[in-house]
């Protein structure tokens, strides 16, 4: 037998069950060796004194009372008896296994596997263990029609055949030594049959490292291919012109902004194709960095486009760009334009008359053509799908690409999640920002909140109220917003002017409300989450979020980021009576930290990585042992080592050959 032989040649694998093996991704004998258990049953006996509440273990003791079976109705019953384990007398119960009474004999020893209930000093029995041996029993994922015992037998067979000794090592020796890893054969054996949990831990560490290292090597291979193969645009411009614009700004760029801008401009100047992610917490000032990059493209006689998820944001960017570059031709492309207006904008884009364009999804529609698109930016990129970003990119001849996001994630994770992209991070907020004080209050305290808000409005503050989010129901969202609007009007009466903003409004209506709020003609703005992304009104200092527990952490952080943009003290008030523990936990975390990175990490832990960056849609492989979030430290080390390997590629020809992949991740 060889490692590459099909599993169908193994004893106990018939023509039918071979299909079940295929369903689990097991085709060859080697696949079987690498099909690891997902957990272990620990049948080794323990003393009750070591057990913690809820822990599962085997206890051996002498039976001190006869078995008593109590029936509840026809099918349900409970068998109970007591055993003495050392100095402890322990109650043991089994549900619905009355036949076990035969095995319970006063004065005899018995071994029971079960779950320890600390407060009742009781073991909820799961099975009577016939033969106690020390060691962990592997438990494998199965598919329908397959039995644990069958799989275990087949796996035993492979190990007994001695084929494990033919499994080649695939990590370089120096890495095994450097990180004190088990070698591959040892690790595979210990994954299936660990001596104890400590051995299992070591095996798992090795397996995770291997998985993440191979993955990072692939990413490096991809990146190298991209850099050498695909020529991009060379954007030639005078740095002085950029510097002049920077000195015209009403503020100084932060260090983080300057660094990010330099990285972007260097990429654009280079003959390579830029593919870069710009990360920065809410309010860190990504817009101005994007604007200056667009300016550089225009100076080099290319067109630049920025795509944003909402119309409010598009209009805001448009106004900013116009103020910053009065000498340029800038267009705004959103849906719902008059036909003639749209036609003119499209003609100007196609003829090259337009230098810059800001738009929503309207930008990626058919019929939108560019003269020479040199730079493509997506703001709040997580709001767009992979395909939408691709369509925009393909409107140019291989333009430079910049994506921006306010959902900060650790750098290595970002590089991983976004495949072969480079990453820039703005890691500081502009000077003079006051921390936002965040409070969590219950609905019962809402009237106190209102009277406090009243005082603040009298003090010239402007306030957002966010109405509760109803998942996937715009009409209910609207109802909620309207009800809140009415309630606040009742409360404030003539004292405050209140506006209402929601997703069903016409664009010019939305625009008008935003303008009024910005111009301080409104004191209070009631809004659905259309306000969530990017809106910038520095004088607004209070954000009240109703039913805040319905939002995820990242979304709450984004919402909160609408305040604290000026120099005045700002507040976020979360009104919520969460029912779930995770809801309570989210409220607590929000009051404890304002650091987007910390929040994003908590969010990751609570929701899993896939949901946050759409890992699934980016086509990343699924990992068997490793987890991108929880094994972040290993991921980082694996990445560093992979980068080093590629620097000395000629020393590792075999390794490189293994990872030379077709195609990419996007
Ligand atoms: P975000 O990164 O969330 O998109 P914005 O680009 O909207 O943030 O910037 C938030 C606010 O900070 C804007 O009012 C912007 O004008 C201002 N701003 C940006 N950079 C600076 C800076 N270096 N100093 C002071 N204010 C700045
Ligand atoms: Mg923004």
Image (cartoon, rainbow, N blue to C red):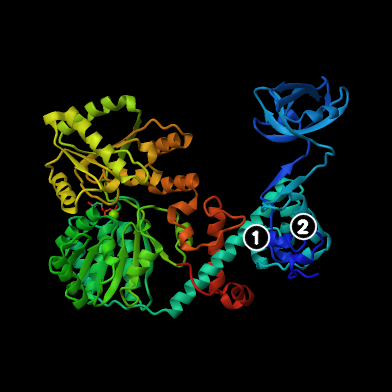
Badge 2 crowding class, 10 Å Cα cut-off, few under 14, some 14 to 19, many 20 or more, is: some
Secondary element type, mark 2:
helix
Query: Looking at the image, is 167 positioned above or below residue 311?
Result: below
Q: Quadrant of ligand 2?
A: bottom left
Residue to which mark 1 is pinned: 23
Query: Looking at the image, is 418 positioned above or below residue 561?
Result: below
Question: Which quarter of the rendered picture does the N terminus lie within?
Answer: bottom right
Answer yes or no: disc 1 within 8 Å of ligand 2.
no
Q: Is residue 435 visible?
A: no
Q: Nearer the viewer, residue 600 or 148?
A: 148
Residue at left offset 13%, top offset 69%: 327
Secondary element type, mark 1:
helix
| Residue 148: % across, % down | 74, 50
Question: Which quarter of the rendered picture does the C terminus lie within?
Answer: bottom left
Residue at left offset 59%, top offset 55%: 626
Labels 2, 1: front one: 1
| Residue 369: % across, % down | 25, 74
Query: Looking at the image, is 83 positioned above or below residue 284?
Result: above
| Residue 463: % across, % down | 21, 38
Question: What's the mark number on residue 155?
Answer: 2
Badge 1 crowding class, 10 Å Cα cut-off, few under 14, some 14 to 19, many 20 or more, is: few
Quarter-of-image position of residue 286: bottom left
Cα–Cα span, label 2 and label 1: 16 Å
Q: Is residue 599 visible?
A: yes
Question: What's the mark number on residue 119?
Answer: none
Of the two numbered discs 2 and 1 on the same chain, state the one appearing first in sequence. 1
Quarter-of-image position of residue 160: bottom right
């Amino acid at each position: 037998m060889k490692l590459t032989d099909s599993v169908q040649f193994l004893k106990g694998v018939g023509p039918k069950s071979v299909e079940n093996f295929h369903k689990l991704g097991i085709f060859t004998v080697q696949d079987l060796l690498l099909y690891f258990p997902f957990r272990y049953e620990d049948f080794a006996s323990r003393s009750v004194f070591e057990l913690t509440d809820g822990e599962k273990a085997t206890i051996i003791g002498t039976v001190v009372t006869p078995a008593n079976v109590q029936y509840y109705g026809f099918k349900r019953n409970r068998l109970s008896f007591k055993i003495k384990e050392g100095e402890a007398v322990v109650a043991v119960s089994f549900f619905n296994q009355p036949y076990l009474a035969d095995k319970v004999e006063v004065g005899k020893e018995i071994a029971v596997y079960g779950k320890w209930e600390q407060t009742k000093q009781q073991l909820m029995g799961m099975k009577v263990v016939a033969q106690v041996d020390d060691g962990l029993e592997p438990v494998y994922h199965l598919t329908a029609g397959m039995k644990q015992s069958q799989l275990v037998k087949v796996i035993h067979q492979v190990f007994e055949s001695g084929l494990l000794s033919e499994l080649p090592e695939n990590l370089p020796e120096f890495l095994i030594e450097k990180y004190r890893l088990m070698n591959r054969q040892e690790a595979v054996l210990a994954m299936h049959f660990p001596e104890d949990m400590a051995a299992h831990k070591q095996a798992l560490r090795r397996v995770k490292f291997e998985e993440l290292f191979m993955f990072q090597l692939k990413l490096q291979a991809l990146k190298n291919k991209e850099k050498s193969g695909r020529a991009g645009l060379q954007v030639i411009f005078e740095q002085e012109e950029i510097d002049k614009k920077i000195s015209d700004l009403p503020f100084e760029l932060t260090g983080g902004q300057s660094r990010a801008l330099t990285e972007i401009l260097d990429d654009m100047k280079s003959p390579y194709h830029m593919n870069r992610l710009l990360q920065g917490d809410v309010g860190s000032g990504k817009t101005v960095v994007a604007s200056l990059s667009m300016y550089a493209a225009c100076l080099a006689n290319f067109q630049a486009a920025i795509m944003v998820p909402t119309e409010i944001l598009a209009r805001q960017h448009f106004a900013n760009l116009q103020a910053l570059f009065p000498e340029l031709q800038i267009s705004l492309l959103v849906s719902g334009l008059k036909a003639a207006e749209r036609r003119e904008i499209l003609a100007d884009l196609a003829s090259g008359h337009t230098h810059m364009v800001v738009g929503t999804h309207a930008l990626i529609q058919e019929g939108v053509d560019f003269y020479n698109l040199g730079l493509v930016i997506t703001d709040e990129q997580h709001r767009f799908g992979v395909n939408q970003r691709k369509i925009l990119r393909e409107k140019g001849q291989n333009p430079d690409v910049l994506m921006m996001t306010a959902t900060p994630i650790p750098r290595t994770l970002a590089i991983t999640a976004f495949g072969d992209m480079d990453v820039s991070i703005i890691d500081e907020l502009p000077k003079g920002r006051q921390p936002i004080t965040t409070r969590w209050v219950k609905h019962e305290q809402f009237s106190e909140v209102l009277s406090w808000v009243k005082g603040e409005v009298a003090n010239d503050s402007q306030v957002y109220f966010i109405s509760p989010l109803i998942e996937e129901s715009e009409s209910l969202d609207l109802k909620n917003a309207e009800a809140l609007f009415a309630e606040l009007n009742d409360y404030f009466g003539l004292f405050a002017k209140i506006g209402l903003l929601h997703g069903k409004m016409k664009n010019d209506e939305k625009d008008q409300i935003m303008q009024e709020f910005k111009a301080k003609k409104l004191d209070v703005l009631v809004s659905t989450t259309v306000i969530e992304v990017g809106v910038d009104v520095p004088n607004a200092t209070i954000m009240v979020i109703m039913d805040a527990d319905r939002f995820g952490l990242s979304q709450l952080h984004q919402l909160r980021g609408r305040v604290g943009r000026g120099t005045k003290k700002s507040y976020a008030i979360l009104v919520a009576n969460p029912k779930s523990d995770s809801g309570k936990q989210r409220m607590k975390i929000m009051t404890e930290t304002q650091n987007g990175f910390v929040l994003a990490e908590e969010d990751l832990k609570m929701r899993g990585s896939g949901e946050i960056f759409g890992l699934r849609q980016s086509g990343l492989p699924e990992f068997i042992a490793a987890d991108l979030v929880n094994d972040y430290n290993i991921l980082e080390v694996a990445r560093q080592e992979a980068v080093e390997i590629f620097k000395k590629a000629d020393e590792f020809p075999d390794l490189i050959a293994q990872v030379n992949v077709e195609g990419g991740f996007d």
